[in-house]
Amino acid sequence: MIAALLMSDVTADVSGTSTASQSHAAIVLPLLALLGTVLLIGAVLALFVRNYLRKRNAAAVRRPGGSIGEPRGARIFQSPVFHCPNRWLAVKSNNPQTVQKALGLHNPTPCSWTEGMARVSDQKLFVSPPVNGWVLVVGSLLPDSSEDVDACFRFLHRLSRELGEVQFFSVSRAVGHHAWARFENGRVLRGYAWAGETLWNQGHKTWGERKLGLKCFEYFEGDSRGHFAQLEPVRANSERVLSLASLWSVDPTSVDDSMLTDAFGIAGDLSQARPR
């Protein structure tokens, strides 16, 4: 009798252990399957991203004709030094010293492109070495068309009378303000500025503007305060200023490495000579 009771207890223990093991397996196995599925999906996504980046980099190196809105030969640097400036000039010239004198810069200091861009401050401009027949001028003291478009016009008019062809570009992506202008020997070829409304629209649309699909509002047409549907073309214009600069002259963010090694520009002090 006692033996039978002991045998029944042992059988019950074994049965309970087996049931617990089955319950444990029923929980663990689905979790392992789920973990394996997640890892597999992660591996597939990683391979997809790697292949995408490889194809994009290969396309950037080949540069057969550029993508829509990016002119042929454009290449963007990843260094913070080459981020898009807020305002810059492109002067048709191979002589930075001539441009420096026309601007009236004081305390001119020869420096490389990288050093000059790093020195740009509230009291300095950087005059670049020649880039494909153009000299670029970068600095926050260049006239801001969104603050005083008349002062910007007078400055560009005077400078172009001294230097020939002068181009002006301005962009503020934070608020969407943008402007571009071309002067030649004191004559306006094209001028457009938008800052919440159209401030300047002079001359005919250029081939580059039409190619990029830029929307240039007439006076009193482009007031974003009353026409929210116009915010999209305004944003698109701001994003394509660099592309327009590349079509007209030089995109400052797409200068070839070979132009940055031995060439020197000029950093100048504007404390005694602000542009007029």
Image: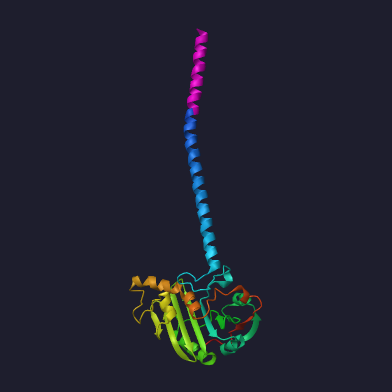
Which x, y percent locates residue 169? 49, 80
Residue 262 highlighted magenta (yes or no): no
Question: Does residue 276 appear in this view?
Answer: no
Question: Which one is nearer the viewer's eye here, 18 or 196?
Answer: 18
Residue 19 highlighted magenta (yes or no): yes
Residue sitting at 49 percent across and 14 percent down? 8
Residue sitting at 49 percent across and 82 percent down? 168
Residue sitting at 53 percent across and 67 percent down? 60
Question: Does residue 106 appear in this view?
Answer: yes
Quadrant for residue 259, please give it.
bottom right
Instruction: Report the residue that reaches farthest toward the front.
Output: 64
Residue sitting at 51 percent across and 89 percent down? 160
Q: Taken as a whole, is the magenta stretch helix, strand or loop?
A: helix
Residue 90 against residue 228 in the figure, above or below: below
Magenta range: 1-21
Which x, y percent locates residue 29? 49, 35
Q: How is the image coloured?
A: rainbow
